[in-house]
Image (cartoon, grey):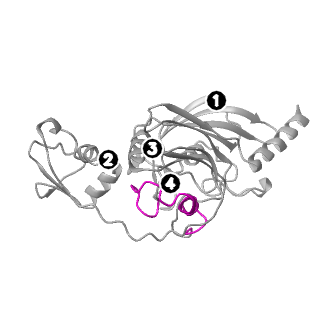
Amino acid sequence: MNYIVDKEDARKRLDIYISEKDETVTRSYVKNLIDDGRILVNGVLQKSGYKVKESDIILVDKPKDEALDVIPEDIKVDIIYEDNDIIIVNKEKGMVVHPANGNYTGTLVNSLMYSHRNELSSINGTIRPGIVHRIDKDTSGILVVAKNDKAHKKLSEDFKEHHINRKYVALVKGIVKEDEFTIDLPIGRSPKDRKKMAVVYTNSRRAVTHIRVLKRFYSSQVTLVEATLETGRTHQIRVHMSYMHHPLVGDEIYGKKDSKWKINGQMLHAKLLGITHPSTGKYMEFESDIPSEFKELLEKLEKKEEKYD
């Protein structure tokens, strides 16, 4: 696809210019194309931040989608809202969002390919149709799926610009002293283990988490907190709380294994998602209750706490 820059578009960033001209792509997708050498300006490779000039000739070589190899599966998922643009899913703990190494079946995408095969956006290709953002396998709760490319692009930009309201509930080890505080520490790949994320100051991105204490369980030495994401980095809450010496209960990757809890995976639930609807512009908020395993553990902690009051 070719573009010739008009006078009114001059001085725009290259990634912004292309994402505005092509409504089916996001800025992050454009950046990937640029990094892969698939976008040329006057026959020359340029960076995402290049300011386009009037009469620049821009060539965009978008790769063709590979043949779909995601197997549609009749797996029931909890859809709490749906319209022509979006699907709001309350994902259960243990379900992977999209196929990846070691998880090619049983994912949310496998389910959606069965129930909404021809109703999902194509921006993220054939492996992640409709997927705007993810939550971890062992994190339960709310996420939004896009049903068309226009909705996907708008939602992706809102996530990028931090216009999405996301609140989580987490049970962490130790007694958190402050009632409210903000963690503003960059996150990137761990230099010690490339499969993990960590607070690092090189090759990282800013990460901001706002924490509010909901309940302290002194007898069990754990704290229930609400975490509001200002940014959305991989494993952000888990990494931040571990760095603050309060790893999530059940998190064996960023904390130590503790058999006394008898649970699988971290106690983390995406309880609230607030978005601006991509078509109507109306603010919409969706919320879900914590899952039964989480609720049962809290009830046990409450009973133990009462004995020590």
**Which of disc 2 and disc 3 is earlier in sequence?**
2
Neighbours of disc 4 within 10 Å: few (<14), some (14-19), many (20+):
many
Question: Which residue bears the numbered disc 3?
Answer: 186
Q: Position of residue 162 (x, y in %)?
A: 44, 37
Dot 2 falls on a residue whose secondary structure is loop
Q: Which tag, 2 or 1, sits closer to the chain's start? A: 2
Range of residues picked out in magenta? 103-128
Q: Earlier in the sequence, mark 1 or mark 3?
A: 1
Label 3 to label 2: alpha-carbon separation: 31 Å
Q: Residue furthest left?
A: 55
Residue pictured at 77% horizontal, 58% vertical: 259
Q: Which residue is mark 1?
A: 178
Instruction: Give the number of the mark in front: 2 or 1.
Output: 2
Q: Which residue is mark 4?
A: 197
Q: Dot 1: within a 10 Å radius of its alpha carbon, few (fewer than 14), some, or many (20 or more) residues?
A: few
User: Identity of the amino acid at label 3?
Assistant: Pro
Whole-percent x and y of residue 23? 32, 47
Please name the residue that numbered disc 2 is placed on. Answer: 23
